[in-house]
Amino acid sequence: MPSLPQNTRYADSLRLSVAPMMDWTDRHCRVFHRLLAPGARLYTEMVHANAVIHGDRERLIGFNPVEQPLALQLGGSDPDALAQAARIAADWGYDEVNLNCGCPSDRVQAGRFGACLMREPELVAECVAAMVAAVDIPITVKCRLGVDEDKDYEVFAGFVDRQVQAGAAMVVVHARNAWLKGLSPKENREIPPLRYEWAYQLKRERPTLPLVINGGIATVEAAQQHMQHLDGVMLGRAAYHDPYVLHALDCAQTGQPLRGREELLVALRPYVEAQLAAGLALKHITRHVLGLFHGQPGGRGFRQVLSEGAHRPGADWALVEQALQVTRRQAERVA
């Protein structure tokens, strides 16, 4: 089985990563998450291989070097196209290419990629092998436990084994089935029951396989529990809706002291102002920070100020300062 590269920063980032999330983990979100979690591995939104080959690459896969270690998640089922897209990713400086075998949306199914590929382990293996042959960076796979009513652990384990045999360097397991009919993508993240024990069993039986768990992990305590059994955890919606959890978990892993929410946000200011100077609207960045004061006194006011004002022409850092002032006043009243 291929081993993960010896790049220390990339290898260490296996312990904590942020899931690829469509419409959320764009480059501005990733810069914010890097600030929160210097030791984490970040993933792009899923991009189809054909889009990488034929589309506007700067818009689709461009990134700021500060985001690294960074993986590009690809969608697709054509080995040649995926190999070509992987070469492009390597040329652009990505640390890893991840193949999506977990997205259950109708659009993805119609294109014969995502979760429906779990029914075609040999095709997935051809895709993995083609990418492995094309590049020197790690090729990894993100999958579910199965699709629809699959309840056979051996089928799931066999799928993983086949991808490892093809050269996959690591597997991320979203510990739910994907329902291909009858559930929306959002419902697919919530309704199918979590079965973490399948991932634990897989790791016990294959101790040398780097294995990361994803799905339903929302607290530092839950993440640390999983880390006793597996090589790493991948936070999804929790890292977006309550991003301070990502910071707290990164600090717990690295031993670095916790920074305050306001301090972290202010540290984002140089990036925000550089992007504004380049013509970006403030709303494209602030939408990713709305959850920073989640559950805190003043959190609602913070979200309200940014949500109502960031879309206005000319909105700048002064709006962020205004949101912070509202947060401070509300917090003082509670205290």
Image: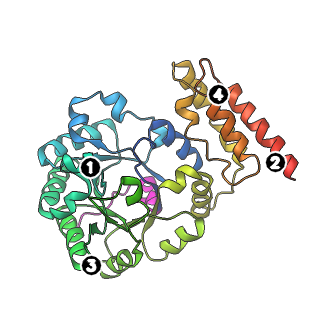
Is 83 positioned to the left or the right of 190 in the image? left
The amino acid beneath tag 4 is Gly
Q: Is residue 232 above or below residue 155?
A: above
Q: Residues within 10 Å of mark 3 (few under 14, many from 20)?
A: some
Going by the numbered disc 3, the residue's amino acid type is Tyr
Whether 2 is among the magenta residues is: yes
In the rendered structure, which amino acid carries the disc numbered 1?
Answer: Asp
Q: Secondary structure at mark 4?
A: helix
Q: Earlier in the sequence, mark 1 or mark 4?
A: 1
What residue is at 21 percent from the left and 58 percent from the top?
116
106 or 200: nearer the eye? 106
Residue span colored magenta: 1-15
Mark 1 and mark 3: Cα distance apart in space: 25 Å
Q: Can you say which quadrant of the picture contains the N terminus? A: bottom left
Indicate which disc residue 106 carries: 1
Picture disc at residue 331 = 2
Residues at badges 1 and 4 in contact (C-beta under 8 Å)?
A: no
- Horizontally, residue 195 falls left or right of residue 324, namely left
| Earlier-in-chain disc, 4 versus 2 | 4
Q: Secondary structure at mark 2?
A: helix
Q: Is residue 259 or residue 29 the one in the foreground?
A: 29
- Considering only order in the chain, which callout, 3 or 4, is on the residue closer to the N terminus? 3
Q: Nearer the viewer, mark 1 or mark 2?
A: 1
Question: How would you rate the neighbour count of disc 2 (Cα within 10 Å): few for under 14, some for 14-19, many for 20 or more?
Answer: some
Q: Position of residue 256 (x, y in %)?
A: 64, 57
Q: Residue 123's x, y, as percent?
A: 12, 58
Left or right of 218 in this view: 10:
left
- The residue labelled by disc 4 is 309
3D distance between C-alphas at marks 1 and 2:
44 Å
